[in-house]
Amino acid sequence: MNSKKKIIAAVLVIFIIISGLFLIGKSGFSILSGLRAFVGGEGLWAKSQKEAVFQLTQYVFTGEENRYQLFVDSLKVPLGDKAARLELEKTDPVDGIIIQGFIDGGNHPADIPTMIFLYKYFKNIDYIRKAIEQWQEGDRLIENLLEIGVQTNHAIINNLMSREQAVQTLAAIDNLQKRLNDAEDLFSSNISSAARETANQLSVIMLCFSLVGIILCFIMLRLIVGIISDLNHKKKLLENQAEQESQFKKALEKSEEKYRSIFENSVEGLFQSTPEGRFISVNPAFAKMLGYASPEDLMANISDIASQYYVNHEDRHRYKQLLQKTGIVKFYEFKARCRDGSHLWVSDSTRAIYDPDGNIVRYEGQVTDITQLKQAEKEKSELEAQYRQAQKMESVGRLAGGVAHDYNNALTAIMGYTELAIMDSDPAGPLHADLNQVLKAGRRAQDITRQLLAFARKQTISPRVLNLNNNVESILKMLRRLIGEDIDLIWLPETGLWSVKMDPSQIDQILANLCVNARDAIVGVGKITIETDTIVFDSAYCADHSGFIPGEFVQLSVSDNGCGMDKEILNNIFEPFFTTKDSDKGTGLGLSMVYGIVKQNNGFINVYSEPGKGTTIKIYLPWDEGKVVEIQEESTAKIPQGQGETILLVEDDLPILELTEKILNSLDYTVLAADTPKGAMKLAREHTGKIHLLVTDVIMPEMNGLELSEHLQSLFPDLKCIFMSGYTANAIAHHGVLDKGGHFIQKPFSKNDLATIVRKVLDRE
């Protein structure tokens, strides 16, 4: 064999060895990359399911509707991975469905081919097969979690979630969480074991192949050395010289290629520019970031960096000052202008390059698009502001609810004794007029208390299914008197309007307050328009409109052509006690009350206004499928009287006890009065006749009103009960009165209120 053939054979053997190593390494890399991708995907899967569990748990605790949407959104990752897995298990899988599933599962697109490769060709390997089984188990658990979420959402929306159901639901969620954690741990363990086994096997193969290659290379190198030793000295020198030149050239090309590859393939924007403001070179990522087709396109269109790249010229000026002073700028943030005129936030890190004389000859830097980060920071700031606002509103609400009891008790005594004094005074005398003013002031104080409780969403209400059109039409006459003759009231009802469920009196409160505000915003002649409509918001619409909630709603809107409001006023209109009116014309509670009523009924409210262009307030109330209850005409009958029935009266507040006893006696009832539950029990046992009715305060020492009624009903099975209290609805509900379907009268109450409910309860079979 001549020297030329020996050289060719040597080269061929070396090529075969290198190619074999390359193929083995590439295959091993694909397997390990697939395993790494599945590990990463499992991390996203675990994070998403934990987030879903957290959001569902919070939804059970708080009942906030957005928690359920966050729960559903969190499950998109595991459900996407499930879709990909189910498609992979088919005999003839569709790659598009698999890829979309893995993308929905949060996997990086570059990792998906290796994940598909690993699943298709290595799914029967022991550890990978076990990992897939755990994956399947995890998917089943996710379906269980989703089912619990749907059931929980249905229970909360329909007010069917009891405390016991909530505890059972949380326990079920906790059990699923543990099982999901176990599945995750086993999946990670099996994938890790597969990776270790694969790495070990590849190492052994590579080692064996390398040893064979080394031996063959050694033999061939000895052969080449023998050939080279036969050449003459001159040829050897020439070859050595040529080899050195070739190696130098390859090293230079390799270095240039390495730099070019880094520059061209970097995901961050890279650039070189002159101090005067012209780009020398940019990489494709930088051009793409600014919306240009190529680096050449960018440099052809931007000839002056200060005016064409920077949105704010001052940013460029400060940037150059920092570079001239320190020679380097790190994480300099500013707004950059894109090709289409839009703006994006970037972070720039640049260093100055100097010549031998110390002069700056160019800038070299890296640019990162931080627009999404800025947007996230803005959204975080807005959420924090909303949270602070919610805390403030809740604090005021707690204050309002807390003072209601003592305030209502005091008002009961003031208004009750005043009403009795009016009845005993001469209608033509000055005392009668003065007492009427006292009663009028007491009713004003009562209205303020109700407004505070409406704002706090804690007033006692009696919701029923109703048609807004009917309720609005029933108070149009009153509203026209309220706004005056100079203002036209236009009523535009929607035909076929859906029904809603709420207290009819709350509709009156909402419209009265909104129409009064609209009237006060109009100078001279104007018009107020009341409209109803049905509307459906989907998730896509709500994502683009802050404050809107997905669902089916009935819309009630009140519009005026008055003076309108600026942004500063709009930001504060629902603040309690905020008013633009004179101190003697407004309390600042009107819109706060409207806001509280709407929130209490699971609705939301939006305000549209501009100075000089009027105001439109739109209220969205959830659609209710129940049957509409017809509006009952208000009774004009005289105060109903007693027929000698015996009433056991229990009240721990002595002025109210004496007042209520006096009223009932004046109505021809026989009253047994007690200021403690034990005293009431004693009176009941000692009384020889029949006790027809128990009228009791709810919150008292020793035992509450409900407990007292249950004790007495064990002695008198036919005993009827009326509960009274100055506490809020939440407190009453806590003591079980409303849950038991008991009759309830809210303090303060008038003689007519008390007489009516007593007669009503006594006459009921």
Image (cartoon, grey):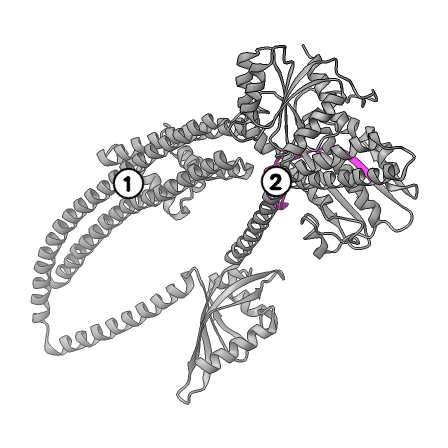
Image check: 636 left or right of 333? right
Position of the N terminus by quadrant: bottom left
Q: Is residue 663 visible?
A: yes
Up the image or down, 286 lies above or below 33; here it is below
Amino acid at dot 2:
Gly
| Image coords of residue 377 (percent x, y) | 52, 56
509 inside magenta stretch: no
Crowd band around label 2 with a 10 angstrom C-alpha radius: few (<14), some (14–19), many (20+): many
Q: Residue at left 13%, top 54%?
A: 213
Instruction: Check disc 2 and report its element: helix, strand or loop.
Output: helix
Q: Residue furthest bottom?
A: 357
544 inside magenta stretch: yes
Q: Residue at left 28%, top 69%?
A: 250
The residue closer to the viewer here, 397 or 346, is 397
Query: Which of the 4 image quarters holds residue 131?
Result: top left
Image check: 16 left or right of 293? left
Mark 2, residue position = 401
Image check: 104 left or right of 503? left
Query: Which of the 4 image quarters holds residue 81?
Result: top left
Instruction: Check disc 1 and report its element: helix, strand or loop.
Output: helix
Q: Which residues are magenta?
A: 529-554
Q: Is residue 95 visible?
A: no
